[in-house]
Amino acid sequence: MSEHQSFRRADPEDRRQSLVEATARCLAHRGVAGTSVRAICAEAGVSPGLLRHYFAGVSEAIAEAYRWTGNRVSHALEDAVTAAGADPRCRLLAYLTASFRAPIADPELLATWLAFWSMTPSDDGIALLHGQIYGEFRAGIEELILALRPGIADARLAAVALTALIDGLWLELSLGKAPFTPLEAEGLVETWLDALIG
């Protein structure tokens, strides 16, 4: 098989991915109401008919954009934990505080995420994805808590509380002009962590 043939086979997947990313950008810049077939395709620089070649419609493209965005966040969290080394406490804190720095603390990512959140009550597919993405995030916290404190009584509730704290701090930091710095947010998380798990 020639390199040219290999590239041609991958090209449709590249086009599909460009539509997924264009959908995320549309959600960030236009919100759910402004994210249409025409808007997505204009953002991707392709003809409007191309979206229907890859997706059943806008809802499916939005679901794929949510999945892709969730994966981007998940990879950033994994990278932070890996960079933290072997110490269980450092790994847990790295996971918890990665949201306060790029690429997660980003106004465009926030705008996209808010669009997904707004759809959760009314779109069953997005609600299911939301449950999966947040479930994986909390499971990551639980796993790291148990690595640090194997005998802890309820790592699940500690993970729920820490998720709520992180979401609030991340939201403020991503909006800009937060009344605290990323370093202060990290300190708050560490204080909560000590209170929750000792």
Image (spheres, rainbow, N blue to C red):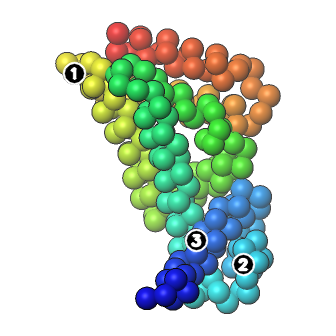
Numbered disc in front, either 3 or 1: 3
Give the position of the N terminus as an image quadrant: bottom left
Q: Earlier in the sequence, mark 2 or mark 1?
A: 2
Identify the amino acid type marked 1. Pro
Sequence order check: which comes first, mark 3 or mark 2? Answer: 3
- Numbered circle sitting on residue 164: none
Q: Nearer the viewer, mark 3 or mark 2?
A: 3
Q: CA distance from mark 3 to mark 1?
A: 41 Å
Q: Secondary structure at mark 2?
A: helix
- Name the mark on residue 150: 1
Q: Residues within 10 Å of mark 3 (few under 14, many from 20)?
A: some
Numbered circle sitting on residue 41: 2
Q: Is residue 18 left or right of residue 76?
A: right
Say the numbered circle drawn on residue 17.
Answer: 3
Measure the alpha-carbon separation of dots 3 and 2.
Answer: 12 Å
Determine whether 22 is above or below 182 in the image. Answer: below
Q: Is residue 39 left or right of residue 72?
A: right
Q: Residue at x 69, y 42 (%)?
A: 106
Determine whether 89 is above or below 23 in the image. above
Give the total number of marks visible in the rendering: 3
Between 119 and 179, the one lying in front of the other is 179
Badges 3 and 2: C-beta atoms under 8 Å apart? no
Q: Vertically, is 168 above or below 31?
A: above
Q: Quadrant of the C terminus?
A: top left
